[in-house]
């Protein structure tokens, strides 16, 4: 009898130890990006939490939304995934994401009072928080100060208005060298909507008022830059990383892109480069910029939501590192970086963030954005004129929203 009891105790203890020792494995979908943010955070988190492992699958930005829709519809979603911030409302409206509001309110790590309002508003749908932004980014005007000097332009006085952009771009363009004065991304993806909206907003338009006179002027301005051959003709096919590569190579004097490029430019650019606020239509016009960055979301089907949120708490706790290591502004606006790298750029983007506007939020955002993308493409290829293209887009958007 004693032997049986001892054997039973041994097996029971072994079984209990096995249960305790077995770590929870979180299935995580993360953005495939050069800075490897999620992978870096995961390694640090696992070292501090050996009972939790993260199995990371990298997803291309262009595929994130479609892969998510496919996964939730087939009940194969991971425990944690990433979405572009305007897509949170679209996915959440189908009741497939976990409401994180109570967890955020109860957290001893996360302080919701310190959130930048823009990023968290983009992750909120019908008063509930479904996304957890890893930070925020926005657009600025990068320019090659060496080319400015060579063209007789003052690099301490970057262009501030559309007319000044046009004039500077003309001086920076050298057809023989295949060097262009200006560049933006009008590729047929979310990136062109992201890039175009600040121009429309500076002139009084917006995503739900895309055919206003100001929006039409903004698209006509883009078209004129391309037609005058002072903007690179590749705007229709250059995504934002490709645009950055053209700037690094010295092929474009000025480009519009985001603060996420700072780490790359600091390593790769061989000339004097600087950053300025986004240009406005004319003096006194309202400033505007796009609000970017991704947010993490927990599908309702996750078997490990508490562990997933614990990982998000760890990411939040590292907010003060966001600028210097990854080139974006933290979700926690009190987590200012010590001795910020690129201090002039930091001042510009911190200021620009005050004027950054979200895309939506709307449960039909992907379709709204598609209508805007189509208008941009149709105009720049002269399939139709800017007014007609944006009227068509507005009709589509009205039908979607109303």
Image: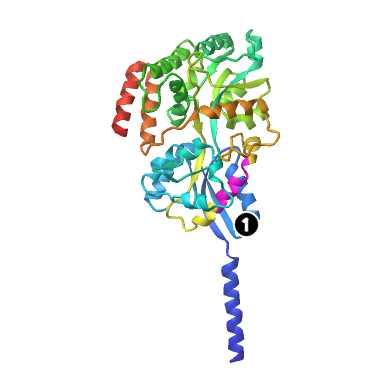
Question: Residue 150 appears in which quarter of the rendering?
Answer: top right
Residue 323 seen from this side: yes
Residue 317 in the magenta stretch? The answer is yes
In the picture, measured across the screen, residue 333 lies left or right of residue 207, that is right
Which is nearer the eye, 337 or 164?
A: 337
- Residue stretch rendered in magenta on the structure: 310-319
Check disc 1 and report the residue beneath it.
49
What x and y, as percent, mark residue 81? Answer: 49, 47
What x and y, as percent, mark residue 385? Answer: 35, 15
**Residue at the image position 38 percent from the left and 35 percent from the top:** 365
Location of the C terminus (image quadrant): top left
What secondary structure prevails in the magenta region?
helix
Location of the N terminus (image quadrant): bottom right
Question: Residue 266 appears in which quarter of the rendering?
Answer: top right
**Residue at the image position 47 percent from the left and 49 percent from the top:** 101
What x and y, as percent, mark residue 117? Answer: 50, 37
**Residue at the image position 60 percent from the left and 81 percent from the top:** 9
**Residue at the image position 61 percent from the left and 90 percent from the top:** 2
* Outermost residue toward the right in this view: 339
Residue 352 in the magenta stretch? The answer is no
């Amino acid at each position: 009898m004693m032997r049986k009891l001892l054997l039973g105790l041994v097996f029971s203890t072994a079984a209990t130890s096995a249960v305790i020792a077995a770590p929870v494995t979180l299935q995580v979908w993360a953005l495939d990006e050069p800075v490897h943010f999620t992978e870096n955070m995961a390694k640090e988190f696992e070292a501090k939490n050996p009972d939790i492992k993260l199995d990371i699958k990298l997803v291309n930005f262009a595929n994130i939304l479609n892969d998510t829709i496919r996964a939730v519809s087939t009940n194969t979603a991971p425990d944690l995934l990433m979405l572009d911030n305007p897509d949170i409302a679209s996915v959440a409206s189908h009741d497939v994401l976990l409401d994180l509001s109570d967890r955020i309110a109860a957290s001893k790590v996360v302080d919701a009072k310190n959130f930048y309002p823009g990023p968290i508003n983009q992750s909120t749908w019908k008063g509930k928080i479904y996304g957890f932004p890893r930070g925020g980014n926005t657009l600025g005007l990068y320019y090659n100060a060496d080319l400015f000097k060579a063209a007789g332009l003052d690099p301490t006085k970057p262009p501030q208005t559309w007319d000044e952009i046009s004039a500077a771009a003309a001086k920076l363009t050298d057809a023989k060298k295949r060097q262009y004065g200006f560049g933006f991304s009008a590729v047929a993806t979310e990136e062109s909507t992201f890039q175009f909206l600040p121009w429309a907003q500076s002139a009084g338009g917006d995503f739900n008022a895309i055919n206003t006179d100001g929006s039409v002027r903004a698209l006509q301005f883009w078209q004129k830059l391309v037609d005058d051959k002072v903007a690179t003709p590749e705007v229709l096919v250059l995504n934002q990383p490709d645009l950055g590569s053209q700037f690094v190579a010295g092929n474009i004097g000025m480009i519009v892109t985001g603060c996420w490029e700072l780490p790359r430019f600091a390593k790769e650019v061989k000339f004097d480069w600087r950053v300025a606020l986004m240009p406005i239509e004319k003096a006194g016009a309202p400033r505007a910029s796009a609000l970017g960055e991704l947010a993490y979301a927990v599908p309702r089907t996750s078997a490990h939501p508490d562990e997933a949120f614990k990982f998000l708490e760890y990411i939040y706790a590292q907010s003060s590192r966001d600028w210097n290591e990854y080139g974006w502004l933290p979700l926690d606006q009190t987590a200012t970086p010590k001795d910020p790298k690129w201090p002039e750029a930091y001042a510009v983007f911190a200021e620009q963030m005050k004027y950054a506007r979200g895309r939506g939020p709307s449960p039909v955002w992907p379709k709204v954005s598609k209508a805007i993308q189509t208008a941009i493409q149709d105009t720049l290829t002269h399939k139709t004129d800017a007014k007609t293209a944006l009227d068509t887009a507005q009709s589509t958007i009205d039908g979607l929203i109303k």
